[in-house]
Each structure stands twice: as C-alpha cells, then as structure tokens.
Image: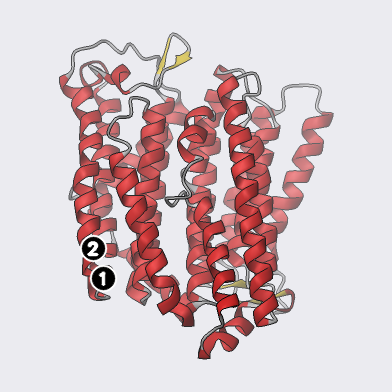
Amino acid sequence: MTSFSPLIPGLLLGVGGMVLLLAGVLSKRDAAPGCTYASIVLLLLAAGFSCSAPDGLLFGGLLKTSLFTRYADALVYLGAAASLILSLDYNRQEKIARFEFPILVLFAVLGMVVMISAADLMTLYVGFELQSLALYISAALARDSLRSTEAGLKYFVLGALASGLLIYGISLVYGFAGTTNFTSLAGILVNGAGYGTIVGMVFVLVGISFKISAAPFHMWTPDVYEGSPSPVTALFGTAPKAAAMALFLSVMIGPFGHLLAQWQLIIEVLAVLSMAIGSLAAIGQTNIKRLMAYSAIGHMGYALMGLAAGTQAGIQGTLIYIAIYVVMSFGAFACIIAMRRRGQAVETIADLAGLAGQRPGFALAMAIFMWAMAGIPPLSGFFGKLYVFSATLNAGLTTLAVIGVVTSIIGAFYYLRVIKVMYFDAGTPNFDATPGSVRFVMGLGAVVTALFVFIPAPLLAAAGAAAKALIG
C-alpha cells in the first residue's frame, strides 16, 4: 500500500503522546487537565482518520487494515476516551491528577491498535507489550495507596508470565512452521499441522486469554480491578478487552483458522470456565469493583462462545457483544465513580441502599446497566447474548449454549441484588454531587443501552461487515 493515511492514527497517538510528555515536563503549572483534554482530542482525531483508512497491507505485510480492524479500533478509542473523561474530576479529587496518566493511555491505545492491525506474530507481540507496559504503570497510578501499588505489582508479575507464554508460543510456531506471517501461516497450515505447531498455537492462545481475563487465567482481575483507581479500572474493562478479543478473533480465524478442530474445544472450555466462575464467584462479593471484575470474566466467556462457533455468524455475534459490553461497562463505572461521600470514594454494594429515594436518576442509570448486563430484554445486553447464543446453536454447540443460558440465569442474581439494594433497602447514601463529566458518560451509556432496541441496524451492519472482512 502506498497511501499514507493508514499511518495517521498511529502517528497521532505516538507523536502526540511524546509531545504531550515534553509539554508536561516543561510546564510550570499543573499540566494534567490540559494533557487529558488534548489526549481525548487526539483519540477522537485518530478515530476519525481510522474510519477513513483504506484496506490493505503495510510494511511488507506486518500490519493490515480492513473493516474488521477499523471496527475494533473504534471500540478501543471509545473506551479509552470514556475513561479519560471519567478521570478528569476523579483524579483531582483523589489527588492523583498527574499529566502522565493520559499519556500512558495514548501509548496503551497505540499498542492496542498495533495488536488489532497485526498481520505477523512479531508485530502482535510488539503491540501486546506496548499496551501491557503502559497499563501496568496505570494500575499503580495512586502510588501512595497500598492497594494501587499492589494491583500494579500483581498485574506486572502475572502479565510478565503471560507475555513469556505468548513469546514462547510464537517461537514454537516459527520453529515448526518456518514463518510468523499470518498469510504464510494460513497457507502452510491449510493441510494441517504437526504437534509442535499446535503446542505453539496453544501457548499463543493462553497468552491472549490472560488479557481478556478468561478463566482459568483470570486470577489477576479481581485484585487489579479493586486496587486500581476507578478510571483506570474503567479503562481495563473497556478498551483492552475490545482489543484483546479482536486479536483473539484475528489470530484464531486468520493464521490458525484451518486448525479449528484442534482449538475449538479449548475455546469451549475457556468459555464454560469463564461463565461459571464469573457467575458463581460474584455471588458473595460485597465490593462493587470486585463484582464488576467477576462480571467481566463472565462476559468474556459469553463473547468467546461466538469464537467457539468458528462461523461468520459467530464472529459477528462476538463483535456485537463486545461493542455492547464496552458501552455497558463504561456506563457502570461512571456510576461507581459517582459513589462519593464527603469527598471519599465508597465501593461497597451496601452503600447504595436508599439511592432510588435520594437520587432517582442515578439509581435508574445504575439499574439500566445492571439489567443490561444480566441480559434482560429489551436492553442491549439481551441482544448481545441473543446473537452469540444463536450462532452457537447454529454451529451445533448445543451444550455450550445451554451452559451459557444457565450461567446467565445464575449471574442475574447478583445484578438484580444491586437493584434490590438501591430500590428496596433502607438507607441514606448522601452521595456528593456528581461532576458533569461523569454525568455525561453515565447518561450516554444509559441512553445507548436503553435505546439500542430501536436502532440496532447500524451496529449489526458494521459487525456483519467486519466479520465478513475477517473471514474473507
């Protein structure tokens, strides 16, 4: 490809991040607000240029652009921008407003974009590590907080293990197949693969599973979600999940697509474990952020059902599910960030008691997100599950679909418990006034989640075109 336009989003993020870093270091005033606003603008500009980029290969086949990559990029930009908006007031109130955070987000997003566009296993690894290093530091943003530094350390140690497994898998694939290029691998593996290549593929699969919090590689998620500052947790629950799931789809359907019979059962097991652990382990949680962590594990299990199907309809279902989940997730975290009393953040579910009587709008928004995550119609979460369940059934994976329905029913318990606490338990939450930036994200998420039933066509069409681009 001779066009320069596909490089513009990455250049905006990379060069923009370095310019903001210099500006923040040289500034004699508090540069955090200015860097945050500038980063949001850069993300929006990158999203605009990404949407207009032509299809093709870059740098001799190391990167690719297509409808699939543009769809996934849009979700990443949306989640990252929402987390930065949520950080504006929260970081200032918690006295952790540092100009480095939005810059770290820009570099993390650059890594995610490289991951999504990777057409070679080595490019995949470079993007994987760039994203990871930025997120490790972000988790420990509140460096004076024991919980935050612990979260950053746990994420770093377990993330390093995942990176090691990933690069070991890549080395095995290269050693036995002789190439790391996606197109070349697909051509070589069309007639099957030896045991060495399959073992390498499994290691690659495990490394990516860590990033999407798929069980049994989820052990970092509850502690990191709870210990990280809430805007950082909102970031973890949106953009990296979308990027890693897109990478999962790209790798398993692309170079390893002909080995469906070898990896399909593994994906089914990951999906079942994720749905079961996400549903059962969340029941006893009292901290709302830990609840959201187990919720994320469960939702990744539902999204993996579409990949397990291995069909175009399954890929479309997963893409629809991830888009809906990103919106539900940043909306729910906006509600969590709004849980402040006398200037201090509160995080237990019991703190929501009586919220409907004092703040009916706040309670309604939270109820919408909880209902949607439970998959109750006519909210968007119901349609996300409908499409992945339908694709799974059509692919003949009836047992997997039944398990998904059962775990969804079990999971509805803890979502509905949050609603019950807000509307039926006696209490006086006395939350502080919600900042305008948080209200904006909360309101946007609630409106999209509630009204999706009336305007599903754009997302369905976009996800269908992206799935077709990946399969084709």
| Left/right of residue 132 with respect to residue 442 in the rendered view | right
- Tell me the residue at 24%/23% (across/down): 360
> Looking at the image, which residue sits at the far bottom?
191
**Quarter of the figure with the N terminus:** bottom right
Element type at mark 2: helix
Horizontally, is 150 left or right of 20 in the view? left
- The amino acid type found where label 1 is placed reads Leu
Residue at the extreme left? 424
Percent across and percent down for residue 223 are 49, 32
Whole-percent x and y of residue 278?
34, 44
- Residue 120 seen in this snapshot: no
Whether label 1 touches label 2, CB < 8 Å: yes
Q: Quadrant of residue 447?
A: top left
User: What distance separates the C-alpha of mark 1 from that of mark 2?
Assistant: 6 Å
| Quarter of image, res 442 | top left
Q: Is residue 143 above or below residue 182?
A: above
- 382 in relation to 185, above or below: above
> In the visual, does 146 lie left or right of 394?
right
Residue placed furthest toward the front: 195
Q: Position of residue 309 (x, y in %)?
A: 34, 72
Residue in view at x 39 percent, y 45 percent: 296
Residue at point 63% right, 34% down?
Answer: 153
Q: Which mark is residue 397?
A: 1
Residue 337: assigned label: none
Query: Can the viewer see residue 151?
Result: yes
Q: Which residue is mark 2?
A: 401
